[in-house]
Amino acid sequence: MKGQIHDSTNNALRELFQLEKLDFAVELTKDLSHGDYASNVALTLSQSIGDSGQSIAQKIVDVLKSKNIENVANISIAGPGFINFHLSREYFTNKIKDVLDSKDKWGESAIFTGKKILVEHSSPNLFKPFHIGHLMNNAIGESVTRLAKYSGADVSVISFPSDISLGIAKAVYIILKKYGEDFEPEQIEILGDAYVEGTKLFDEDSSIQEEIKNIANNLYEGKSSPELKVFDKCKKFNIDYFENITAKLGSKFDSYIYESEAGVVGKEIVLKNTPKIFTESEGAVVYIPEEGRKDINTSVFINSQGNPTYEAKDVGLLSLKFDRYNPDISLFVTDSQQKPHFDVVLDAVKKINQKWFENSTHITHGRMSFKGQKMSSRLGGVPLALDTVTVVTEEVLIKNSEISNLQAELIALSAIKFSILRVQAGKDINFDPETSLSFEGDSGPYLQYTTVRANAVLEKAKSLGLNFSFENIPEEVIDLEKITSRFPNIVERSITEWAPHHIVIYLLELSQAFNSWYGNTKIVDDTNPNAPYNLALTQAVSQTIKNGLHLLAIETPNKM
């Protein structure tokens, strides 16, 4: 509809002012009382034509009304010259029909049909438990993945595990000293403790530093050794652990690109582009930004030991991504604190391969803290993902002991994911169990509860032999119908901006509208001739929230 209004307005501009093309906006109205779409076209023209916005708007509206645009019931002028478009009863009836016909495909777009999109997220550090930062990364990455799939694109999902580094060599050193080369990993905590202990010991005891550096070199080179034997077993255990957790969160990965392989490729690329792009300095290879780039610093890409740094590994990662997948859009999700690192990498990459730079989009997330002494003390400084889910699940069961553990966990996950996805990219989050677990207001459980409530209405109607139909449709279009019809627009905006928070804001608005209508309307009423249509609208709302929650990777329990 937006495109139709834009095209009709462009035709009016040609007729009135002989303008072939003008850059103007047609947007959904924020206030439904002002209509369904609004355009600033008259205000855009006012300065160049030398007439008032209202005067220009009136001329445009007169032409548009004479054309009888399909599905537009009325056109009005507001304020200094905004043009408001009010859509017809038939339009909204057909939209509700579309929801019921499309079902799980309602809201899907075709804006990236024929394109390849690659999403990289939830990249773990081996020898470290999956913590709250990974959980945040996963929530955003999985939602972006599902938005990409709704765009019509061919989507691939990868993870970039950190498998070889000096830090991991420190952990392997501790494991060999404590358990020997026949060590069989069974608990991720043992690997995490070895990582912490090895890091501390390396800093305190200079006599072991050379040995640990040799372990790192053996791992980089894949040299047969006790440390490689231990490392390979721990690596497999780590990936299994990672896949179990991410499956619980609703994610699945098509493949992995490991730091070890990216490091090899990255080092080759850096050396190949030295001294053209990179510079040798004191036995290392560094990148020195151009004089005008005061926002980024000189960075080491190959250290004095000849090993690639994280910067070089990310260059190698980009090369492998485009060699293996050749994406039109390559999305990657990281902590916002890594932005300076990637600013340097992408500045260098722009000089190596313009396509890698132009087709790559960096999505960031902030940090999560926890409100309330009880929760903060239980979770500690850097909460583990599974511990966080367990603690929140226990809070759910305290509030509602009648539901099952599985249902409680679904509610807990919805509360956590909602808290992460409701904020804009890069913003920090303070998780409050009181508000985040509420069945009323702004929360994931509130959205789930609205779906359960709508489905309960439909089940009650079914038990009474009532079903939806479009035979008796009320003349007045209510806000709930208008909001429901906007779902595809919201999805498309979320896709173009890679911003799941638009879906969250929309679902809250839709849920609030439904619950208000529910409180003022007897939906299951065999004496009301409009009742069958009300059931159709209820079904449409339930389907829309379900599809929206799917895009947020949130499941809905049967009972709350």
Image: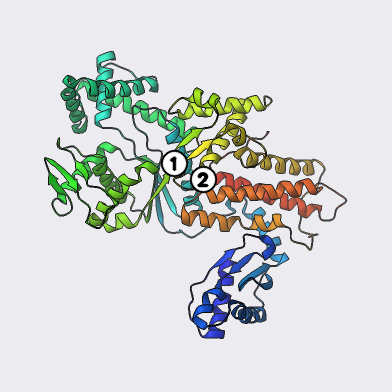
Q: Which residue is mark 1?
A: 366
Amino acid at pointer 2: Val
Residue that appears at 43% across and 52% down: 154
Give the camera-side residue of 330 and 368.
368
Q: Position of residue 191 (x, y in %)?
A: 34, 22
Residue 549 position by quadrant: top right
Which residue is drawn at the image coordinates 50% and 59% (left, top)?
A: 110
Q: Which residue is mark 2?
A: 423
Q: Taking 402 as reference, is 93 above or below it?
A: below
Query: Looking at the figure, which quarter contains the C terminus?
Result: top right
Residue 91 at least partly seen: yes
Task: Mark 2 and mark 1 in contact? Answer it, CB < 8 Å.
Answer: yes
- Residue 323 visible, this orientation: no
Residue 130 position in % (x across, y down) = 42, 30
Give the left or right position of residue 304, taking residue 257 as reference.
Answer: left
User: Residue flagged by tag 1: what amino acid is it?
Assistant: Gly
- In front of the other: 15 or 426: 426
124 horizontally vs 504: left or right: left
Q: What is the x, y in percent for residue 80?
A: 61, 73
Task: Provide the secondary structure element on which disc 2 rests.
Answer: loop
